[in-house]
Image (cartoon, rainbow, N blue to C red):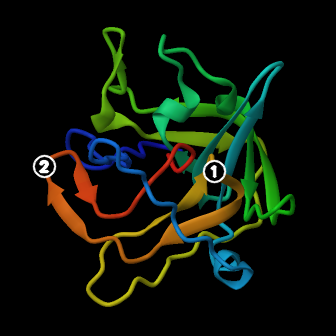
Amino acid sequence: VGRPWGGPGGRLVAWLWALTASGETIEAMPLWRKGEADACQDVGRVNAAGYRRTQMCTGTLIAADAVLTAAHCVMDAQGRARGLAKGRFVAGYRQGSYVALGVGLDAQVHPDFFREGHFDARYDIAILRLREPLEVVPREIDLPEGTAFAVVGYNHLRPHLLSGRLDCPRLEASDWQMLIDCPVRPGNSG
């Protein structure tokens, strides 16, 4: 996969925060109809199953054998690989059907993500390498005029349907994070 972490200092960050006022409920992202979801077949679920638990995050195919996801999806709180590091990437997943299925070989986590026993959100990025290349073409999404950000993915409330918004305005930003006005839930990570 090479060095996927970006320019000087390696700061390519994809981190989603769900912020609410006290007692406020996070609204759900709109579900995408089949035609809309078909345009994003390179987005899929990163899945792992175990004896008592299943895990899920969102991933995006960035090469025929590489999926971009969040580091916290493939690494546990002790800095060890989770089941998702060798899980499955299900491209274009929708209610049990999918376009392609890739088996994870390993995950490359940003080297600065886990240090001194703690996660560093600035580096919450990982590449899941697949055993075999998939025949799915990564695509760009056309955003509405004047909009720079979109959130597309799966979440724990609707894990079998793609949801998202293409019109997420930026609220504020620092040198390593950005706050956008679109709701996210567990599972959207990646």
Camera-nearest residue between 129 and 188 = 188
Q: Is tag 1's residue or tag 2's residue first in the polypeptide sequence?
A: 1
Labels 1, 2: front one = 1
Res. 34 image quadrant: bottom right
Residue depicted at x 48% and y 34%:
71
Please name the residue that numbered disc 1 is placed on. 157
Q: Position of residue 43 (x, y in %)?
A: 62, 62
Please name the residue that numbered disc 2 is placed on. 174
Say above or below: 145 vs 118.
below
Q: Residue furthest front?
A: 23
Residue depicted at x 38% and y 26%:
111
Circle 2: element type: loop
Q: Position of residue 172 (x, y in %)?
A: 15, 58
Residue depicted at x 49% and y 39%:
126
State how far apart marks 1 and 2 are (Cα): 30 Å
Q: Which three-letter amino acid code belongs to the residue tagged 1?
A: Leu
Camera-nearest residue between 103 and 177 = 177
Circle 1: element type: loop
Q: Position of residue 179 (x, y in %)?
A: 24, 55
Say above or below: 93 vs 11.
below
Q: Mark 2: give few (<14), some (14-19) or many (20+) Cα within 10 Å.
A: few
Res. 55 image quadrant: top right
Q: Position of residue 1 (x, y in %)?
A: 54, 45
Q: In the picture provided, is 63 more to the left or to the right than 117?
A: right
Q: Which three-letter amino acid code belongs to the residue tagged 2?
A: Ser
Say above or below: 180 vs 86.
below
